[in-house]
Amino acid sequence: MKVTTKGQVTIPQEVRESMGIRPSETEIDFVQDSKGNWYIKKIDNNVNSRFRTAHKLVNPIMSTEELMQLTRG
């Protein structure tokens, strides 16, 4: 498969379906093993990261300190 001038490739449909990769919903990462091989890894968006969930808790009228407390746990 060819890489575009922007560094993009198309993940084949069979691979997307097999991995459950959905446009605009799924995040992926590239990981390298100890032998130097690279792999695509689907990121589990259900992980309760304080950074991933903070945006759902933000009240638009919160102070900066209140917003910082959300990210500090």
Image (cartoon, grey):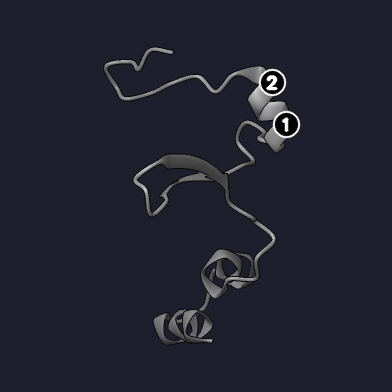
Q: Amino acid at mark 1?
A: Ser
> Residue 28 at what x, y percent from top left?
53, 43
| Residue contact between numbered discs 2 and 1, judged by CB atoms under 8 Å | yes
Q: CA distance from mark 2 to mark 1?
A: 6 Å
> Residue 7 at what x, y percent from top left?
32, 25
Q: Quadrant of residue 59?
A: bottom right
Task: Answer above or below: position of 62 versus 24.
Answer: below
The one nearer the camera, 7 or 55, is 7
The residue that disc 1 covers is: 18
Going 44% across and 13% down the picture, which residue do you hit? 1
The residue that disc 2 covers is: 14
The one nearer the camera, 49 or 19, is 19
Quarter of the image with the C terminus is bottom right
- The 10 Å Cα crowd at callout 2, few under 14, some 14 to 19, many 20 or more, is few
- Number of numbered markers: 2
Going 65% across and 26% down the picture, which residue do you hit? 15
The one nearer the camera, 1 or 36, is 36
Going 56% across and 75% down the picture, which residue do you hit? 50
> Residue 32 at what x, y percent from top left?
40, 49
- The 10 Å Cα crowd at callout 1, few under 14, some 14 to 19, many 20 or more, is few
Q: Quadrant of residue 57?
A: bottom right
Going 60% across and 36% down the picture, which residue do you hit? 24
Q: Amino acid at mark 2?
A: Glu
Task: Answer above or below: position of 54 versus 26.
Answer: below
Left or right: 42, with 9 as reference point:
right
The one nearer the camera, 46 or 65, is 46
